[in-house]
Amino acid sequence: MINEIQINPPVATYYSFASLNDLRRINYIFGANGTGKTTISRVIAGEQGYEQCQLVWQGGSELERVVYNRDFVDRNFNQDGPLQGVFTLGENQVEAEREIARLRPEIDKVNGKISSLNVQLDGEDGQSGKRQELSDLEPVLRDKCWKQKQLHDDYFQAAFTGVRNSAERFKEKVLEEQLSNTAALLPLEELKEKAQTVFAKNLDRVEPIQAFSANELVAAEGNTLLQKVIVGNPDVDIAALINRLGNSDWVKQGRQYHEQEPDICPFCQQSTDKKFADDLIEFFSEAYDNDVQALRELQVSYGKASESLLATIQRCIDTRNPFLHMDLFNAEAQALAERLKSNQIILTKKVDEPSRKFELELIGPLVTQLQSLLAEANEATKEHNQTVANIATEKRILTDNVWCYVLNELAVDLQQYQKNKSRLKSVIQGMKKSLQDKGVQLHEFKNQVKELERQTTSIQPTIAAINDLLQKFGFTSFSIGRTDDGRYYRIIRTNGEDASRSLSEGEKTFITFLYFYYLIKGAQSPAGITTNRIVVFDDPISSLDSDILYIVSSLIKSVMEETRSQSSQIKQVFVLTHNVYFHKEISFNRTRSPDNTLSEESFWLVKKQQNGSAVVRCSQNPIRSAYELLWDDVQSVNISSINLQNTLRRILENYFTMWGGMGKEEICAHFDGREKLICQSLFSWVNDGSHSIHDDLYINHGDQTNEAYLRVFRSVFEKAGQIGHYNMMTGGGSEELAVLPTLPIT
């Protein structure tokens, strides 16, 4: 079935888009001549010149279209050669008919499964289904991948080179890396730190920092002289006194003064003899002097070593190595300098007071910390310099590490994506395989039907049926025969002469319709008789007498009744007409309520407005009578002046003249003065507009003219005492009708 007909402008009288959607098995389309009905039938038929218009098929499966319109008449009757034969199944081929009857439900069943599979794959609208579900996975993953790019782009621009400006390419790169990336997963901070070096634009080699040692200074901390009590010779007479005083360092200082004044005691200022001087010299023996000298040497060497160490440390600082933790290193170096200064003071005290014990503050931990910081910086420097030497390789490795991190961040999303993608691909593949199998099965069934049709078809049953109808309906002056080759019809008189060029318009229309009617049940070739199809009747009663109209209506209604059956090969019917009586006859159904439609039918109106043709869906059968339709046009805000002229004339003539027996003069007699002139001009205008051709040089009707004469038109009903009828027909009131007769209009 056709779900929707889309008419894309410009085509014929359609200047804007028009759509007939949610179509049913039986569809009634009513419209006046020239409104665009035949355009709809040509769109359904797929005629050349209507390619921009679209048909939306249920389940995506197209059916054969059999269209009756004036194009069909021209192709099949108004031609020099004979009509093509309409093949039907031979009446005596019972077994073949039974086999074809058995195969047709099987074909319908397979077609139904194919349609169902197509709907599952692509949806009813062609934009959903499993294929769309599979397609919808991509933008979801793309957005999640792009968020990762935006999150890390500031640090890893070099790693994202080539995919930074396209979310789709970034997603494709993620999927590509998922298949091939084997890099190590590193912490984000480490990646950022490496990126500052590897991805730097100007990358230079860094000089390592000179190492240093403080072994001499550390060794001084354990010198035994610092803990040794250095005193004089205990065997000298004066030794007992000095030891009792416990201050040999004080005595030693006094010895220096005694050497300057040998006769005076430097401690009590009394006279001394030579023995006192000898005892002082003997007390401070050579061993004492050696120890003191060793202390002085230790003091000097410690000072020099301290200066050398601090100078080396300062040079380390001056290198400005980017990998050295400068703040921590400066703090440790300052602490070491303070401690060395303190130890030098301690050594000075020891030299001045050899008899006292002293301990140096330990510098080992501070030196070790500085050496550790230095070693870390040199290790980082070494790695940096290796990176500089192998920058291309390092960039590749770090890029792989970055993508590995991104993949790890997207691991859950990628897993879900691959799972859903694999599932949907499997489902789609299975459906495609089923479609392929069903297609093969359908092809086999159709081949079987074609073979049966070739064996059993003949045009003779169609000839007999058409001739029988012609006889029953009084067409006795001609009949249908077949050509010598048995494949075509010809129209012959009773004496056997060709009658195709001497038929009246009504006879041509009727016989062409009968030909189409039997074509619906058959085909124009021996194969294809039993295929499912859609049937279109576009104004099939043109030029027919009224009695033939009911015959045609009856035949069409039989087709529609057959269409209501699910097993029928006719799956959908369209009836397009401008004739009110034909429409009412063909659409009559006693089971339908006046204010509703049946589930298998739809009603449409085609109107020609100032901006072109338009199609309107109706919730109920829109056709009551031609007279009521004329009043609908009076109330239309978009009616052209030409159409309005014709409408007003027909209403006035039918209501007042034909039904009421009132002429123009009698009507105008109800008016006086200027109003009478207006009434007379109204009758003149409507007749001029509906029966003559306007000269654009002298006449120009517009919207204001429409409004003015519509007001006069209403006044005619007021003056004639028929305002109640006017109000009823326009919906403007509920006044009772005048007693004029309401006869039907032809």
Image (tube, grey):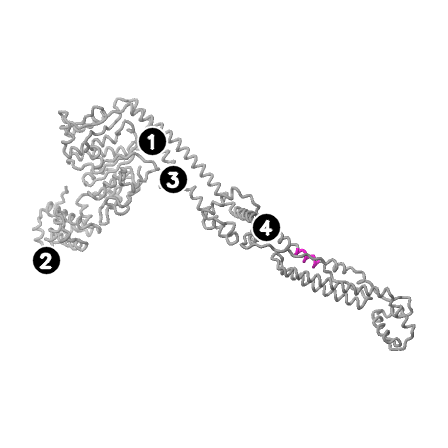
Q: Which residue is mark 3?
A: 122
Q: Quadrant of the N terminus?
A: top left
In the structure shown, which secondary structural element does the residue marked by tag 3 occupy? helix
Q: Which residues are magenta?
A: 365-374
> Depth check: 619 or 289 in front?
289
Query: Whole-Å distance between the Cαs marked 4 and 1?
Result: 75 Å
Secondary structure predominantly adopted by residues drawn in magenta: helix
Question: Does 135 sit left or right of 334 as displayed?
Answer: left
Looking at the image, residue 251 sits to the left or right of residue 639; the answer is: right
Question: In this orientation, does residue 630 appear?
Answer: yes
Disc 2 crowd rating (10 Å Cα; few below 14, some 14-19, many 20+) is few
Which mark's residue is nearer the viewer, 1 or 3?
3
Q: CA distance from mark 2 to mark 3?
A: 69 Å
Depth check, front residue: 383 or 179: 383
Q: Which label belongs to residue 389? A: 4
Report how far apart the C-alphas of labels 4 and 3 lie in the structure: 57 Å
**Numbered mark located on residue 674 in the image:** 2
Q: Nearer the viewer, mark 4 or mark 3?
A: 4
Q: Of the residues tagged 2 and 4, which is closer to the observer?
A: 4
Give the mark, 4 or 3, whose residue is nearer the N terminus.
Answer: 3
Residue 332: percent from left, percent from top: 67, 61
Query: Residue 245 occupies which quadrant of the picture?
Result: bottom right
Question: Would you name the residue on which mark 1 appears?
Answer: 108
Residue 414 percent location from the top left of the image: 50, 44
Query: How dense is the environment of label 3, judged by Cα within 10 Å: few (below 14), some, or many (20 and up)?
Result: some
Amino acid at pointer 2: Arg
Q: Amino acid at mark 1?
A: Asp
